[in-house]
Image: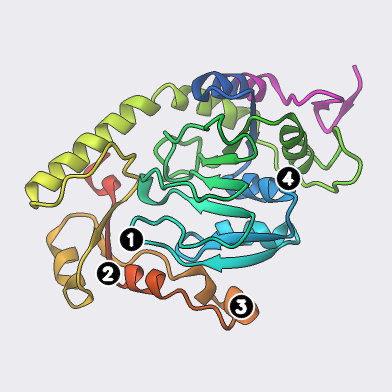
Amino acid sequence: MNTLSGYRVGKPDGGPECESFERELERYYGVPYARVFNSATSALHAAAVAMPDDLIGVTALSMSASAASVLHANKAILFHDIADDYSYISPQADTVVLPHLFGHHVARPDVPRVIHDCAQAPSVRPDPAHPNDIWVYSLNQHKVITCGEGGYALTFRNDYADTLHAVRNHGECYTTDILGWNYRMTEPEAAIARIELMQLEARLDRRRQWAYDLQKAHDLPLDGNIDWFLYPLRVEPVNRSVVASEIIGARVGYHTPVYRLPYFAKRYPSVVCPNTERIESELVVVNPEAYGI
């Protein structure tokens, strides 16, 4: 059998553990195509390459990888402000990156294509009503399930799956116009991830029970059936330090809005997203890991 970089020519397969993990992900999420990566950031990059647009919208409140993946794909960013429920405000790009922050299943904007950054919300299930979307998940060491590092992308489209595979594997399969990178998941990581996937539902149940107990103990508003990667509280900025000191595992703030990070600030100096700035100024986040969850 001819091989290129350990991957079979003409097939989207890696080693047997990676192959098995992909098939298990397809069954679990109900999609025809899963592709595993060495990180969710790599998967976001590959997803941005797969999209046809040269301009991609990104919400301003997210981890920097949501935006960096677009630039790595040699595409431009259009930063968008967010609403109080972390959804987009009036998106003006045909393709957007949508982070499902804190485990919330954030409402999909009415645009042709979405790259769903589900790093914090592993129970988000791909919707066949939106076959032009791609869903990306993380297996980093602090996520709900983990193999130390890693990620995966899910899609309903064969051409997207081919591009994801080409980007992760030096462009050696399916296409001739993608340079590609070495974004492959290792076999030991895939073996661990397969076991972790079987624990996902139980771990989500524990996090939901923890969030319910936290809400009751501190008389907080009860929320829905969320993944609770982190528990976000919104308080007046003047009271944030006091609130954070009263709750185990709480810290003031989340991430600086992406456009204010030095690299992006130099390239997008005129961007201001006032609602994002206000929301970030009110956030106190509680980490379930402080409770052993």
Give the left or right position of residue 40, taking residue 227 as reference. Answer: right
Look at the numbered discs 1 and 3 and tell me whether their residues touch, using CB distance below 8 Å: no
Numbered tag placed on residue 60 in the rendering: none
Disc 4 designates what residue? 50
Q: Earlier in the sequence, mark 1 or mark 3?
A: 1
Does 186 appear in magenta? no
- Coordinates of residue 203 in the picture (x, y in percent): 32, 31
Give the left or right position of residue 34, taking residue 288 as reference. Answer: right
How far apart, in angstroms, are the residues tagged by discs 2 and 1? Answer: 11 Å
Which secondary structure, mark 4? Answer: helix
Image quadrant where residue 124 sits: top left
Numbered tag placed on residue 282 in the rendering: 2
Q: Earlier in the sequence, mark 3 or mark 4?
A: 4
Q: Earlier in the sequence, mark 2 or mark 1?
A: 1
Look at the numbered discs 3 and 2 and tell me whether their residues touch, using CB distance below 8 Å: no
Which secondary structure, mark 2? Answer: helix
Disc 3 designates what residue? 268
- Coordinates of residue 60 in the picture (x, y in percent): 49, 66
Does 9 appear in magenta? yes
How far apart, in angstroms, are the residues tagged by discs 3 and 2? Answer: 24 Å
Disc 1 designates what residue? 84
Observer-nearest of 194 and 232: 232
124 relative to 30, above or below: below
Q: Which amino acid lies under the numbered mark 1 shown in the image of this protein?
A: Asp
Q: Residue, x 28% and y 36% (percent of image)?
A: 225
- Coordinates of residue 159 in the picture (x, y in percent): 77, 34
Segment colored magenta: 1-20
How far apart, in angstroms, are the residues tagged by discs 3 and 4? Answer: 24 Å
Which secondary structure, mark 3? Answer: loop
179 relative to 92, above or below: above
Look at the numbered discs 3 and 4 and tell me whether their residues touch, using CB distance below 8 Å: no
Q: Which amino acid lies under the numbered mark 3 shown in the image of this protein?
A: Tyr
